[in-house]
Amino acid sequence: MKIAIDARMVKYSSMHGIARYVVHLLQCLRSIGQEHTFYVFLNPNSPLQDESWPEHIQLVPVMGDWISFREQWEIPKLLKKLNVDLFHAPSFVAPILCPCRLVMTIHDLNHLVLPQFYTPFHQFYYKVFVRRCIQASEFILTVSHFSKSEIVKTLHVPEEKVFVTYNGVSERYRPVRDSQYLDYVRDLYELPERFIFCVSNTKPHKNVHQLVRAYCHTPINIPLVLACPVDKSLIRTAELSNKKHLIYFTKFISEDHLPAVYSMAHLFVYPSTYEGFGLPPLEALACGTPVVVARSSSLPEVVGDHAIFANPFDFRDIARALEVGVKDEAIRKSLSENGLKHAQTFSWLNMTRKTLEIYHRCYVPSISSDLTTMVEKPLSGQHG
């Protein structure tokens, strides 16, 4: 089978959740799925061009940007030229006039559930293009049962058309103990000796403003490190509580260095109000770091019982959770040990295997209905 995968969202210094999902899918396809030919669509200067790929994975340059009008005619033209059997759109971006079978991965419904946080162009794009593509897809992949329920309920997609394939945690995410390397990373990003860590962006649903407000409400004097763009309003909030000196903003942290930063952190906090999956808290758990997360959307499903939960809409409750996470050594020890084991059950390789099963089902519609059970339920206690 000839399968095209859209990887145009993979860019330098922009490894958001969707991009990381695509990169891990492609890396796993190096070793499985060799019976197929994969065409990887990418924009010029993609970091994927820095690597050598096996013969069954071919890079195909595309001029149209990810989320653009040009892609609506350029992608179908390429699919026809390459005689592709199946196009996998690993995000909400796909051509309306797709000349082959289509599978989409819908990570969440941010654009529909929280339209006020997106530009008019993005709202238009989602309303006009995405809804139609979702209806035209053979199957929809998603990353949590929370997102599946949102897709079925909001977009009126038949439940049997939507399959859950959990994200994984890369093997690089494990506790880092090398003191020299930790010192190198600490110096590189100018990190304090002890700190509370949050990796996010400043979109409203990420709730970083509420986090800073909560942090300022506590007597905690361990610095709060924010891996997000500098925001003057956050600085003003800290100034009002005389905690400006305790708020650190880091430059973009390379994924190569993230395990070390997680491992150094005294506590990781993720207060987002809406997530389709929420990979950072799971990665922090994999590094043995105690985690505070919002009790919202998919986060309880992903971290299980291995986090301290807080109401993301109540800064006082976030403040309470931060204090517990910093001070209660018994809880910290339990979360660190059991959370690490929990995170190890999420595998990118399992996710890729189950994705391949969906590809096969598209190509051979008569495949056994047992596939539904295989994809929907983790095998042997492992998530895919």
Image (cartoon, grey):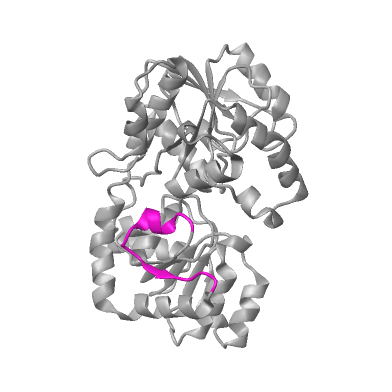
**For the N terminus, which image quadrant?**
top left
Q: Is residue 9 above or below residue 357?
A: below
> x%, y% of residue 205?
59, 61
What segment is highlighted magenta in the picture?
A: 297-313
Q: Is residue 88 above or below residue 192?
A: above
Residue 43 visible, this orientation: no
Q: Residue at x 56, y 68 (%)?
A: 208
Judge by depth and name the residue closer to the eye, 69 or 230: 69
Residue 47 visible, this orientation: yes
Q: Quadrant of residue 126?
A: top right
Q: Residue at x 51, y 54 (%)?
A: 275
Q: Quadrant of residue 183?
A: bottom left
Does 381 appear in magenta?
no
> x%, y% of residue 91?
56, 38
Q: Quadrant of residue 263?
A: bottom left
**For the C terminus, which image quadrant?**
top left
Q: Is residue 275 above or below residue 12?
A: below
Q: Residue at x 57, y 87 (%)?
A: 241
Judge by depth and name the residue closer to the eye, 279 or 240: 279
Does 312 appear in magenta?
yes
> x%, y% of residue 343?
31, 52
Q: Does residue 142 appear to the left or right of 32 in the view shown?
A: right
Judge by depth and name the residue closer to the eye, 40 or 279: 279
> x%, y% of residue 193?
38, 74
Q: Does residue 323 appear to the left or right of 216 in the view shown?
A: left
Q: Is residue 170 above or below residue 240?
A: above
Q: Does residue 216 appear to the left or right of 352 in the view shown?
A: right
